Amino acid sequence: MRRLLESRVDDEDRSLFVAGVKDSLPLLTGIVPFSIIVGITGVEFGLTAIEISVMSALAYAGSSQLAAIFLMADNTTIFLVVVTAVLINVRFAIYSASMAPRFQSLSWLKKVVYSFLLVDTIYALSMSRFPERKAGRSHWYYFGGGLALWSFWTLGTVIGAGMGVGVPESFPVDLVLPLVFIALLFPILEGRPSAATAVVAGGVATVAAPLDYNFGLLVGVGCGLVVGVSLNR
Amino acid sequence: MSGIATMPTAWVWIHILAIAVATYALRVSFIGLFSYYEVPEGIKDQMSLIPPAVLAALAVPPLFYRDGGFYLSPLNPFLIAGLTAALVAWRTESLIGTIVSGFGAYFLVTAVPIA
């Protein structure tokens, strides 16, 4: 009975939830265009509007979704599609470790839902805003922001999927993905080791591009990491 | 190139679910399972190299290798588009700006008959 009372939502919880929603709104200018691009690209490469929208809603990780679309369109193996998604998204495990102590005392249902909402943006938001929020309740802030970001992400893909249908035949769709990957790459380069990693990974993957099933991708990533890690010491 | 249109629908859904489950497993890993474990800073540093490696390995090959052959000419429109986009991405870090400038360069090169 006491546990039930404790988990009841009161006004303070609600205002923290709303604060999370509000703080997430400025981030939408970055998220929604990306999400729209994911929707357009998915449809252009042969997914149905429903497939790409559900993919956005469930996988909720744009870069890995685009990588998956790229690899699926190139008739590669499901193994490589999943490995690539895991590599791109492995940072979520670090975020998970970092959030775990704050979610320690919550119910398993909250842990299940909050884990699902964990992405770069809500993580960054919580990292900078959590400490000033009230202890034991600050997770409502995470929930508000996380839910808003997920909703707009999914909505953006639905809109993009609708727009994708109108793209003319002559448009060079094959160019979309390399350009998006370039746009996503530069902001995460910080310092010489990561730049060297990217140069080697890109160069080796190109030379190894004729390998079957896009395995050149893994060869490139492996070589890039060897160089990056050795520089990072 | 698009092999997705010819893929059986069920197989497409299996891909979608596989990506979703794998990604969720990463998210729930520490929150749901071992809450007390603290990832050492050194490992975090090394792991932060993985996304740049994957994104570069995805971005670069299509600029040079298309339809089963290498295309190394300096007038290769994909290469020019990619280099323009890289410059804009580096200077502005703008997603839309990068894509628009890349396509702009592509259409410019393909519209103007050089050589």
Image: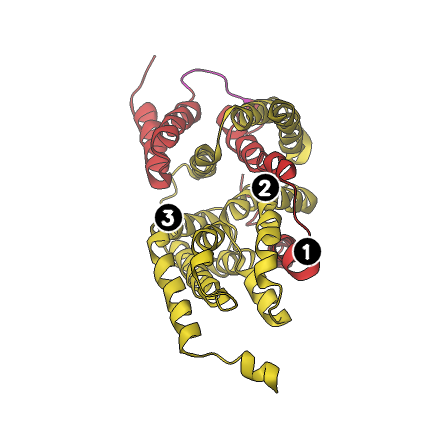
Chain colours: A yellow, B red
Tag 3's secondary structure? helix
Q: Report the amino acid beneath label 1.
A: Tyr
Q: Residue furthest top?
A: B115
Residue that carries the numbered disc 2 in the rendered image: A71
Q: Residue at x 33, y 54 (%)?
A: A26
User: In this rendering, would B82 be left or right of A97?
Assistant: left
Instruction: Name the subunit of mark 1.
Output: B
On screen, residue A55 versus residue B19, left or right, reads left
Q: Nearer the viewer, residue A16 or B32?
A: A16
What label does residue B36 carry, if any? 1
Q: CA distance from mark 2 to mark 3?
A: 25 Å
Chain letter of the residue carrying label 3: A
Residue A125 appears at what percent x and percent y? Answer: 44, 53
Give the foreground label among 2 and 3.
3
- Which residue type carries mark 2? Leu
* Image location of residue B16, percent across then percent down: 60, 55
Same chain? Circles 1 and 2: no
Q: Which mark is residue A30?
A: 3
Q: Secondary structure at mark 1?
A: loop
Answer few, some or many: residues within 10 Å of disc 2's Cα (few below 14, many 20 plus, some between 14 and 19): many
Q: Is residue A1 left or right of residue A40?
A: right
Which residues make up the magenta segment?
B70-75
Q: Say if A151 sits above or below B110 in the image.
A: below
